[in-house]
Structure formats: C-alpha cells, structure tokens
C-alpha cells in the first residue's frame, strides 16, 4: 500500500505553514485519540499515521526535504542520520516525538487538572441570605439573629469522615495521589482515583453521623450586626460562615443581602427621606404650625408660612437616614398636601359661599391664570 501524503493525512494542502500544521495535528490527535476510540482499531492506525506526518512536518528541515523529495526523502538514509520516523512499528519513538504537543493534549484531556501531588482541598461554597429589615431598623442599626441552613463540619469526626478512633488511611488504589494512571494504547492517561474520588484517603469505618462526608447539613444560628444606614442592595459579608470546605479546605463566606421594606409614611432616596403631610385649607391659607413624625419615632414642629400652596416642600436638616459609611445624616423633606374639605355641614357650606363672594369682591379681576385665559381667547378672535 502506498504511503499517504503527509499533508493529506493531516487534512492540509501542500505548503501549509507551521501554525496550520500544529493546529491540524492537534485536531486529528483529539479526534483519533485512543481514549475516545477504544473500539475502533482503524482510528489507532490513523492516529499513528497522523503522528508520523506531524513528526516530519513540524521539523523545518524534514519538512523541506519532504516538500522536495516526498517520502523518498526518508528512505535509504536521505533524511540524514536516521532522524526520520521509523514508521508505525517504531512505537517507542512516538511518545518522545510529539512530546511538545503531548503536554497540550494532556491538559485538554484531563480538563487541565494535570500536575502531581495530592488532591487539592476545596473551599466551601459561598452562601447568600436575603434579609428584610424595617426602615426604622435601617435607621438605628440592629443586632439580629438569623438561622442559615448550611453544611458544617461534622462534629462527630471533626471533618475527617472516619468513625471515632479510626484514622483515615492512605488510599490503597492511588497511594494517596488522588489519581491513577492507566495505559491506553501507547498513552499513559491519568484519571481521578475511583476509590477515593481524588481525596487520596479512604475511610475504613465511615463516620455514622456524616456517612464519611466529613460535613453535615445544619441550621446555623448567627448574630449579624446590621449597621445604621443600610439600604436595599447593601451586602454584608460574614467571612468563613459559608459552607464548610471539603478535605480540610477553608469555609466559604456568607453574604447577607439587605432589602429595606417600604414604609407607610416615609419614602427614601439614598439618605434623604420624604413625607407627604396633609394640611387644612385654613392652615395653608393662614399659616400655622403642624407636627410631623420623624423616623426616630419622635416628632418635629414645622411652621407653615401663610399662603402655602399644595406641593410646597420644607426641609428638616439632619432628620434623614444616617450615612452607612460615616459622614452626616441626610435630610427629611416634607411636602404639603392641601386638603379640600369634605362632608361639610350646612353652616360650613354657608361660610364657604360667603367666603367665595368676598373673594370675588376682593379680587374682581380674577387670578393671573384667568387673565391669561382671557388674553388667549382675545388673541384667537383676532
Ligand atoms: Zn485513591
Ligand atoms: Zn462525621
């Protein structure tokens, strides 16, 4: 059988450059790797062919010779000093021949878990806990106890997973490496040890409480300091209060996500508070003093100027929310809402009618609004 063209073997056109050759070879090697083709003997043959082709084409000198003389370049000593591949029989050469890409491939196949040593300890997961707080509590700050379901270190075996008195032993399958090597064709492949799942240790008598896992589900009671000034979206991190780690790894963190509840009186905008306060038509017209609630549970007296319109805002300095990261407190704004009186007695109506008559006498030209309206109508006529 005639030998296949090396470029063709790798699915390349003649004259392909080094990068293309390496890329094509990696592709082929992945496709044809014995690991993925355990019951396809043809793939193994093609794999060897691809290796042979790559062995020549990756070497600039050999590639030049091949480009010029074809396969003849490596027959009868023309390749120079027997440096060429010896063909599919010479298996011993292959491992070293493509050791440079071997490293790459190995990384791929092992999911990047290469490297000796013991299986790594794993950090526990971070946990999220959503906490709703009242606006009043966000104002004062609060010490709160929360119950968090989490995985904690098993108290019975202190996390080892072994029954009291029996120590975990080095895994007999992998000798504590957490990985095993298997021969696949002429490849040696490393895998996570099936006996210990990579831990490197096994437990003869598993702990009866955690069944050897070393951690147990538990509701943990934690005291949380909620600082004054928190707002919706504030996160509080409790280092090491997340899930327990595996194989002695550190615990994760617990993140408390704050959500501040809406308040029936106060609306918040960062550190400022807003409050709508109803005032009677008489108080708005004559001026006076009203009492408004404050977030600290107290009250403040506020002067209403004579002739206040609905929507008028007044500021109470420093009566807003405290700033979370220091600095001054926000302000409280009150907005007047002038109320139209309802459910009037006949006497009240009588007074209002009289008031209306007096108003017209007092201001016979009408308000500036009606003057504008009249001007508008006049201009439309013209
Ligand atoms: Zn093992
Ligand atoms: Zn245990």
Image (cartoon, rainbow, N blue to C red):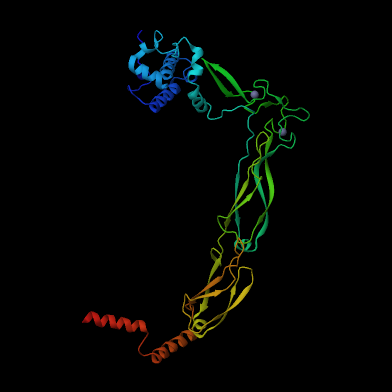
In the figure, residue 330 lies in which quadrant? Answer: bottom right
- Asked whether residue 78 appears in the rendered view, the answer is yes
Nearer the observer, 278 or 116: 116
Quarter holding the N terminus is top left
Nearer the observer, 141 or 280: 141
Residue at image point 56% right, 70% down: 331
Which residue in the rendered view is the most extreme toward the front?
81
Nearer the observer, 304 or 95: 95
Picture layout, residue 114 above or below residue 376: above
- Asked whether residue 6 appears in the rendered view, the answer is no
Picture layout, residue 44 above or below residue 299: above
Quarter holding the C terminus is bottom left
Picture layout, residue 193 above or below residue 349: above
Residue at image point 35% right, 22% down: 12
Residue 20 appears at what percent x and percent y?
38, 27
In the figure, residue 209 lies in which quadrant? Answer: top right
Which residue in the rendered view is the most extreme toward the right?
165
Residue 103 appears at what percent x and percent y?
51, 25
Residue 324 appears at what percent x and percent y?
60, 61
Give the quarter the ligand 2 occupies. top right
Nearer the observer, 256 or 173: 173
Residue 71 appears at what percent x and percent y?
36, 12
Please state if 11 lies on the left or on the right of 314 as rendered. Answer: left
Picture layout, residue 22 above or below residue 43: below
């Amino acid at each position: 059988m005639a030998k296949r063209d090396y470029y063709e073997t790798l699915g390349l056109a003649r004259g392909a450059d080094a990068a293309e050759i390496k890329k094509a070879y990696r592709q082929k090697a992945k496709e044809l790797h014995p690991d993925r083709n355990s019951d396809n003997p043809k793939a193994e043959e093609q794999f060897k062919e691809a290796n042979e082709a790559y062995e020549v084409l990756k070497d600039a000198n050999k590639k030049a010779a091949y480009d010029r003389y074809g396969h003849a370049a490596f027959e009868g000593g023309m390749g120079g000093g027997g440096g060429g591949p010896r063909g599919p029989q010479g298996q011993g050469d292959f491992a070293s021949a493509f050791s440079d890409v071997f490293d790459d491939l190995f990384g791929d196949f092992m999911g990047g878990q290469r490297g000796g040593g013991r299986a790594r300890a794993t950090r526990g997961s971070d946990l999220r806990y959503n906490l709703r707080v009242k606006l009043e509590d966000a104002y004062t700050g609060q010490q709160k106890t929360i119950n968090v379901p989490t995985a904690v270190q098993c108290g019975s075996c202190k996390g080892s997973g072994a029954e009291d008195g029996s120590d975990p032993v080095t895994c007999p399958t992998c000798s504590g490496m957490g990985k095993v090597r298997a021969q696949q064709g002429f490849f040696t492949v490393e895998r996570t040890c099936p006996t210990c799942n990579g831990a490197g240790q096994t437990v003869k008598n598993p702990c009866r409480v955690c069944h050897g896992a070393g951690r147990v589900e538990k509701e943990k009671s934690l005291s949380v300091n909620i600082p004054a000034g928190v707002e919706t979206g504030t996160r509080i991190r409790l280092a090491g209060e997340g899930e327990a780690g595996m194989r002695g790894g550190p615990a994760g963190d617990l993140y408390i996500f704050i959500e501040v509840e809406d308040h029936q009186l106060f609306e918040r905008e960062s550190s400022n508070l807003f409050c709508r306060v109803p005032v009677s038509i008489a108080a708005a017209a004559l001026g006076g003093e009203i009492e408004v609630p404050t977030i600290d549970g107290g009250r403040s007296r506020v002067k209403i100027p004579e002739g206040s319109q609905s929507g008028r805002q007044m500021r109470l300095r420093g009566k807003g929310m405290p700033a979370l990261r220091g600095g001054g407190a926000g302000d409280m704004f009150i907005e007047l809402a002038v109320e139209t009186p309802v459910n009037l007695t006949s006497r009240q109506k009588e007074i209002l009618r009289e008031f209306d008559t007096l108003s017209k006498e007092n201001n016979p030209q009408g308000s500036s609004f009606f003057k504008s309206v009249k001007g508008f109508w006049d201009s439309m006529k013209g």
